[in-house]
Amino acid sequence: MALVVMTIVFGLSLILGMPIAFCLGLSSLATFIYIGNPLFLKIIPQMIFQGISMFSLMAIPFFILAGEIMNKSQITDTIINFANVLVGHIKGGLAHVNIISSIFFAGITGAAVADTAALGTILIPAMVHEGYDEDFSAAVTVSSSVIGPIIPPSIVMVIYGVTMKVSIAALFASGFVPGLLIGIALMIVAYFISKKKGYGYRKRASFREILSKSRKAFWGLLMPIIILGGILSGVFTPTEAAAVAVVYGCFAGFFIFRTLKLSDFPGMLKRTAITSSVVLLIIGNAKIMGWILAYEHMPEIMANLFLSITNNPYLMLLLINLLLLIVGMFMEISAAIVLLAPILAPLVTSFGIHPLHFAIVMLVNLNIGLITPPLGQCLFTVCGITNLSMEQVVKATLPFILAEIAVLILITYIPALTAFIPQLLGYYK
């Protein structure tokens, strides 16, 4: 009955539009009151603090701040220009520039919403100016933003690694191939839609132009190389890498591009604090709900439910994919990871599925939820940039969502796609 109370309160608060962190906290509080044990109420602050007092979680504000610095330093512009000379000549050139820019940008921020905001404000007006429909431009931007949290560094991978005690470096290594596959799939869809609608392309850049733009983009592209190279080589931890990213961003902004000012920092620090506090509050409150689910034996209930349906690992993965796609539509990704990973990961590993493989499957699933209604954060962001309605953006995004689901199916049933790089680095054991 306690789970029923929690579900009802959580559902009602979500329907009323309450922020997800408070939905988690309020439903957990209501459940504790229903259980009636005063000791449980006393340990709420302890559980919240326990949920967020982890060294690895310090990477989150550092990566967010690094993204802010790189945006303010106008490094985003150099990356977009570099992508333009690489793929701008292909049919639907600016759409491909948008997707390639997302791939490059993924190595800097690791946050889909940041990708949508940074690239959308620049590329959507540029695409519209060159004759692309605004809904198509928005759809390309929002669908490619999903790549951000899959190609490392990734904030959600940090959260998953902390929650499940999985190597964050191994998760980072596992995300490369799935992220690139999503980018390729989106470019294929963009090409055929552009060909059908007659969207133009730019003149092929000369070798001199490519060389010039690559020189300007070098310092921006060097950042993910430093971060990932340091992590994967064991020079520093992901948390230390996030701090290094901030230092490098300051160096590039002040001394190389000379576009960063000390007066920019109060605003950047404020936005970093707000974004970080939201994520950490979600994690802290989700920790309480996770404790309740464990207390009520929810992992065992879910395991028995799935096992009563099938004991076939392939069908099991299909059912879990469907569950996670639905959950991603209604729940913030950080909360979904903290709540569902401890329940589902032990279940699938009991079928012989590798923990790293399932981690990437789960993260890709939930990231797709960022661009699906009703809770898709990236959808709201791009609607704010374009003033298009949610219905217009969703309709235009549908072909890209189907492409991402096709890639999800591939990585679900072909483990080698996620295992290839971790195996080379010795993480996949």
Image: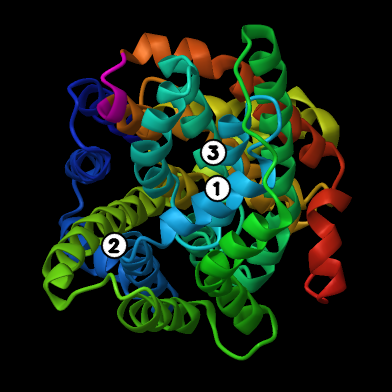
Q: Quadrant of the N terminus?
A: top left
Q: In the image, which disc is placed on residue 375? A: none
Kindly identify the amino acid type of the residue bearing the numbered disc 1. Answer: Ser
Q: Is residue 114 above or below residue 64?
A: above
Q: Residue at x 22, y 22 (%)?
A: 12
383 drawn magenta: no
* Residue identified by numbered label 3: 98
Specify the quadrant of the image occupied by residue 96: top right
* Residue 57 x/y as whole percent: 39, 71
Pick the front one: 219 or 232 = 219
Specify the quadrant of the image occupied by residue 16: top left
* Residue 311 x/y as whole percent: 82, 33
Cα separation, mark 1 vs mark 2, equals 17 Å
* Residue identified by numbered label 2: 72
* Residue identified by numbered label 1: 101
Q: Residues within 10 Å of mark 2 (few under 14, many from 20)?
A: some
Mark toward the start of the polypeptide (3 vs 2): 2
Q: Quadrant of the C terminus?
A: bottom right
Cα separation, mark 3 vs mark 1, equals 5 Å
The reply to whether callout 3 and callout 1 are in contact (CB within 8 Å) is yes
Identify the magenta region.
384-388
Kindly identify the amino acid type of the residue bearing the numbered disc 2. Answer: Lys
Secondary structure, mark 1, is helix
Secondary structure, mark 2, is helix
- Tell me which secondary structure the magenta stretch mostly adopts: helix
